[in-house]
């Protein structure tokens, strides 16, 4: 199951899931259609991502959830960012933990997330609070992915305008940076492969920084 499949990371994860021979079916959950057709892909449109009461029957029987839904905090108050980052994530995760106790839940967070929830950077506090709440839910396992710079591959694109423009202007540098420091600069392909790897076999740590994500993908 994938949330945020139309975002840049979600597009990469979806591609890897559809390519993986051991993935039998994929459900993407969201408000908008992905525009992708595939034999093992199904889409579930949910107008209100805080309320899954009408679709619970469609959310059972899954081994893993890749939660890639997120927004930039630029221009947002803490209350607005919390509503999207914390409230929407926990609304879905609490239902999934109840319906799929054997599920592995993988959450896309970010480098610099503040696990103490008390730091001076707003987005990092909210992400830290979200991570901590997810770790308390009764999933089989939960993992917090904290990627930094990600190079979009295979046509993946960011829906956030500032990121999309940045990739357009300096994207040519990313392959060079990856050649120098491959464990620091990731790709959407590597992130997707790493998510599948931890869903299959787990990981030594709950929180995966860029180097850990790279290692998980290389061991996939």
Image: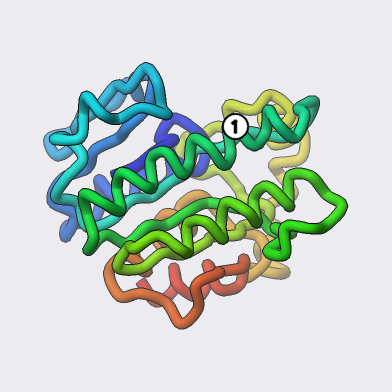
Q: Nearer the viewer, residue 130 or 31?
A: 130
Residue at (35, 24) in percent of width and height = 34
Which residue does the image show at 34% across and 42% down from the upper left?
Answer: 2
Q: Residue at point 22% right, 24% down?
A: 54
Q: How is the image coloured?
A: rainbow
Hey, which quadrant is residue 139 in on the image? bottom left
Instruction: Where is residue 112? Give x, y as percent.
Output: 74, 59
Q: Nearer the viewer, residue 177 or 1?
A: 1
The x and y percentages for residue 143 are: 46, 64
Q: Is residue 214 positioned above or below 18 on the image?
A: below
Label 1 element class: helix
Task: From the top left corner, tell me how far across and down residue 128 is, in percent.
Answer: 65, 56
- Residue 92 position, x and y percent, is 38, 40
Above or below for 144 versus 38: below
Using residue 67 as the reference point, say whether residue 178 is left or right of it: right
Which quarter of the figure is the C terminus placed in? bottom left
**Considering depth in this image, is 138 or 106 the residue closer to the camera?**
138
Q: Quadrant of the N terminus?
A: top left
State the residue in front, 44 or 87: 87
Neighbour tally class for label 1: few under 14, some 14-19, many 20 plus, Cα within 10 Å:
few
Judged left or right of residue 170, residue 63 is: left
Look at 40% across and 20% down and name the residue there: 48
Q: Is residue 127 left or right of residue 66?
A: right
Quickly name the residue at label 1.
83
Number of dots carrying numbers? 1
Image quadrant in which you'd find residue 20: bottom left
The vertical placement of 207 against 82, above or below, is: below
């Amino acid at each position: 199951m994938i949330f945020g499949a139309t975002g840049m990371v979600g597009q990469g994860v979806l591609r890897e899931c559809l390519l993986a021979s051991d993935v039998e079916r994929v459900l993407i959950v969201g408000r908008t259609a992905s525009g992708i057709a595939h034999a093992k892909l199904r889409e579930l449109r949910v107008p209100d991502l805080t309320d899954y009461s009408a679709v619970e029957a469609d959310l059972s029987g899954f081994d893993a959830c890749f939660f890639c839904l997120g927004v930039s905090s630029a221009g947002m108050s803490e209350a607005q960012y919390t509503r999207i980052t914390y409230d929407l994530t926990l609304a879905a995760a609490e239902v999934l933990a109840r319906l799929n106790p054997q599920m592995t839940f993988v959450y896309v967070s970010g480098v610099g997330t503040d696990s103490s929830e008390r730091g001076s950077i707003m987005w990092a506090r909210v992400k830290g609070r979200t991570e901590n709440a997810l770790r308390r839910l009764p999933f089989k396992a939960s993992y917090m992915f904290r990627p930094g710079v990600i190079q979009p591959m295979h046509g993946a694109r960011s829906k956030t305008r500032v990121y999309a423009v940045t990739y357009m202007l300096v994207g040519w540098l990313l392959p060079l940076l990856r050649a120098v420091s491959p464990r620091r600069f990731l790709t959407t392909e590597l992130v997707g492969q790493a998510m599948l790897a931890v869903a299959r076999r787990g990981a030594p740590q709950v929180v995966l920084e860029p180097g850990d994500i790279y290692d998980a993908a290389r061991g996939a």
